Amino acid sequence: MDEYTRELIDELFADTPGTPSPPNPEICNHIEKMAAEAATAATTGPILDLFSLLKRIRMEDGQTPEAFGLSREQLADLSQKHETLDEHHVTAGGRLNRARPIVEAANARVDEYLRARETEAPSGVEIWEVIKRNQKRIQAQLNIDDLDWSSYSGQLRNCIDSVAALAKIIDLTPEAIADVTRVTNRYRMRMTPYYASLIRPGIVNDPVLLQSVPTGEMVDNVGVEIPPVAADHSPARLIDQFYPRTVTIKVTNMCAMYCTHCLRIAHIGKKDTIYPEAAYGEALDYIRQNERIRDVLITGGDAFVLPNRMIRKILDALDGIDHVRLKRLGTRIPVTAPMRIDNELLDILEGSNERKPVRVVTQINTAQEITPVSRDAFKEISKRVSAVLNQAVLLKGINDTRVKMWKLCETIQESYVRPYYIFWL
């Protein structure tokens, strides 16, 4: 008999102060039948049911198994039978006194999460009807036709990049307008109409709103720039290198939207820039000449903002470098402008993945960013690459509770994206 079962049986037969009330005759008959069934059972269930009932009666009424005509020896025999029947020789005491309480405690946490998840952290799939109404409203307010709304070029042409455009789609107080104006004098603001449609009207702490609309805090508490995004980690043009076998190519300063928490916000610049061919050439030459490098992250800005021909050209060049074994592309496009994911891009990713693994690394910070449209985009990408990974940023008011982060991880897993890591800035 193992220590867990010995502990269980000792608990059932332990002396208690006072005299327990006599057992109910119906309970006596019931336990007698359960004991007979357990003795002849071909499964472990009847044995565990008997032990569970005896434990509950012992705790609630103080009666020991002897009150029902059951001895230590009989229960020891039943526990041995349980261990023999179980394929992994799990004991009755281990299962009843250890495993099941752990599961019950976990179930209580899950139940608490299930009660809170839809109100505290709704996904874009769950509020899709609200989002569709937002889309119609924004289309009318910004005069965007259906063709422009459903195209990537149309989303960029109609992007919200001024206080005037923002005020058309979001109710802003005079103080908020002044704050946004102060920030946009220093940093760029842009969000696609699609991403703006994910904002729930009237929710002041909406997680999409917090990520996309600047606040005065961005200039009032700017702090000191962190060295890893500055010159001391850039050994060559467009290159950042934090680790000897991994480099980052910052292939563009462009994004479909600019996030309020962006680590590179000071480097985005005042206008979109297409880099000269020579810049990409210098970056690729640096990688060719350093045979220690095996992993290349293509980012920016946003890698998927590049035209397909440029993405193909960069991936082809990396595939032609023998010591480069893995390519990653960093993008938020599938949640900010999922209509960008076209068949040509998917074919390019698949072709490169056939040669060497391609991983798409995205950033999803709230379940609200996953809609039926973005979920479909991730599903298509996942068919063409070796992995789609999420690097979330831990953000105040956005994903800083257990329920919000739990819902985020479950939602992206159901959308063909694997939780990867969390930035804790």
Image: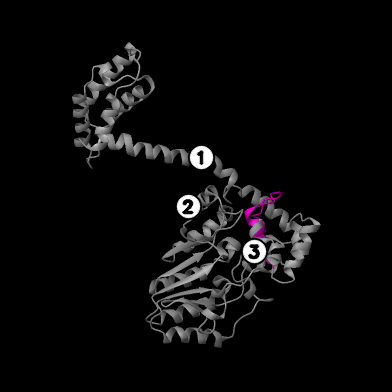
The magenta region covers 189-208
| Sequence-first disc among 1 and 3 | 1
Marks 3 and 2, how far apart at CA? 27 Å
- At 30% from the left and 15% from the top, the residue drawn is 28
Q: Distance between the residues labelled 2 and 1?
A: 21 Å
In this view, 378 is above or below 3: below
- Which residue corresponds to the image point at 23% horizontal and 17% vertical from the top-left? 69
Badge nearest the viewer, 2 or 1: 1
Image quarter of residue 101: top left
**Residue type pointed to by label 1:** Glu
Q: Where is mark 3, residue-wise?
A: 260
Rate crowding at label 3 as few (under 14), some (14 to 19) or many (20 or more) other CA atoms within 10 Å: some
Judging depth in this view, the residue of 259 and 58 nearest the camera is 58
> Which residue carries the number 2 mark?
414
In reply to whether residue 197 is colored magenta, the answer given is yes
In the rendered image, which quarter contains the C terminus? bottom right
**Label for residue 419?**
none
The amino acid type found where label 2 is placed reads Glu
Q: Nearer the viewer, residue 303 or 345?
A: 303
For discs 3 and 2, the disc positioned in front in the rendered view: 3
Q: Determine the secondary structure under disc 1.
A: helix
Q: Which of marks 2 and 1 is nearer the N terminus?
A: 1
* Residue 362 placement (x, y as % from top left): 52, 64
Residue 406 visible, this orientation: yes
> What amino acid type is highlighted by mark number 3?
Thr
What residue appears at the point 23 percent right and 42 percent down from the top-left corner?
A: 88
Q: Quadrant of residue 302?
A: bottom right
Residue 112: give its label: 1
Instruction: Let me know if residue 307 appears in the view.
Output: no
Question: Is residue 168 on the magenta stretch?
Answer: no
